Amino acid sequence: MERKNILFISSWFPNKVEPYNGNFVQRHAEAVSLKHDVEILHSIGDFNQKEKYLIDDQLINGIRTLIVYYKNSKNPFQNFYRRMNAYKMGFAKMKKPNLVHANVMHNSMLFAVYLKKKFNISYVVTEHWTAFQEQNLSKTSTIAKIIARYISKNAEYILPVSNNLKSSLILMGIKSPMRVISNVVNTELFSIKSILKDIHTVKFLHVSSLIPRKRPKDIIKNVVKLHQNGYSVSLEIGGDGETQSLTSLVEELCAEEYIKVFGAITYSQVAEKMQNSDCFILFSENETQGCVILESYACGKPVIATKVGGAAEFIIDGLAIGIEKNNTDHLYSVLEKICKNEISFKDEKEIRQFSVKRFSMESIGSQFSEIYDEIYRRSMS
């Protein structure tokens, strides 16, 4: 099929206010750009901004990315009005798309509905939001659910990133056609690297937003316990969240020699840390998917992860070990077995192949393209 003009819009997207927010959406756009002409439009409020609106229009990784910043206020209704107005200002500067690819059914994506009603531009929605997972639905506001149902009702397809999230959306009453299309892994960046290893020390790694539900302190405490019990271990732990409390905990436990806490790092630095590790730990209370699992696999590294949400779908025999949610004893037991060499994983090339085959930019780009082509054929018939 011929290349199409695809406009990506998203409730979350990396910007100067939140540099890492929604970076998985950016990677989806890059995957689609292998087969189609892609532009990205985003709108976000900034409390520190003096101007009412400020346009940032630049080329990022080969894709025109236009972000309209509006002056944020404490009035949510005023902010919503300014956000929609900012989207309209940005849209006026873009090429007319054949299709809009929206992301996250937050009220921001009512702009996709507006484009369909006013310009007859069809849209699909990729859904990532943990708020729509079954275990979180009771805490998600009624208005958020109503907005999501309305956005989905007008969409050609809803594309959740995991089967777990798909099931939850169905439970929520969403009846639109659905297909699961995962987050993407840059398998060129996340690759196997031949690195001289310390055969005496097991090197664990954790990278995340470090919010409480990721349970980073439990990971630290378990690695300390391993060390205290005579095992030669190390841990690198960090990400784009609050690190001071983790650093204080490491100091309090006198573990500075073998546990290093780091702050926000680039995507390529994440890949480098994975390549230098022996095993990735994910001890979350909930995950819509868990991109880091797939990235670790792409580096040929096995994973220890809690069997929660979408992450449970990617805990594959020989590639990962599943841990019971919030069960620190189970986590310790598995970590100890790895230190004792009582758990064996597949060869690193086999681990990598799982990620390349299903989650590479080429694979994900092709899966989206199939959806776009189907919508195009329907509109032509």
Image: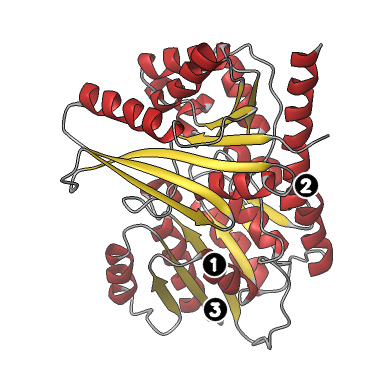
Residue 161 shows in this picture: no
Residue 306 x %, y %? 58, 48
Label 3 sits on what residue type?
A: Val
- Circle 3 packing at 10 Å, graded few (<14), some (14-19), many (20+), is some
Residue 207 vertical placement versus 314 (above, below): below
**Residue 270 got which mark?**
1
- Residue located 44% across and 31% down the image: 92
| Gap in angstroms between the C-alphas marked 2 and 3 | 36 Å
Q: Nearer the viewer, residue 106 or 365?
A: 365
Disc number placed over residue 233 in the picture, else none: 3
- Secondary structure found at label 1: helix
Q: Amino acid at mark 1?
A: Val
Instruction: Give the CA distance from mark 2 to mark 1.
Output: 22 Å
Position of 220 relative to 123 (above/below)? below
Q: Which sits earlier in the primary sequence, circle 2 or circle 3?
A: 3
Give percent across and percent down for residue 311. 62, 43
Mark 2, residue position: 363
The image shows residue 180, relative to residue 354, as above or below, that is above
Question: Can you tell which of label 2 and label 3 is closer to the viewer?
Answer: 2
Q: Is residue 65 left or right of residue 351?
A: left
Image location (x, y in percent) of residue 37? 66, 42
Quarter of the image with the C terminus in it: top right
Taking the spot 57% from the left edge, 30% from the top edge, the residue there is 96
Query: Which image quadrant: the N terminus?
Result: top right
Q: Position of residue 360 (x, y in %)?
A: 74, 53
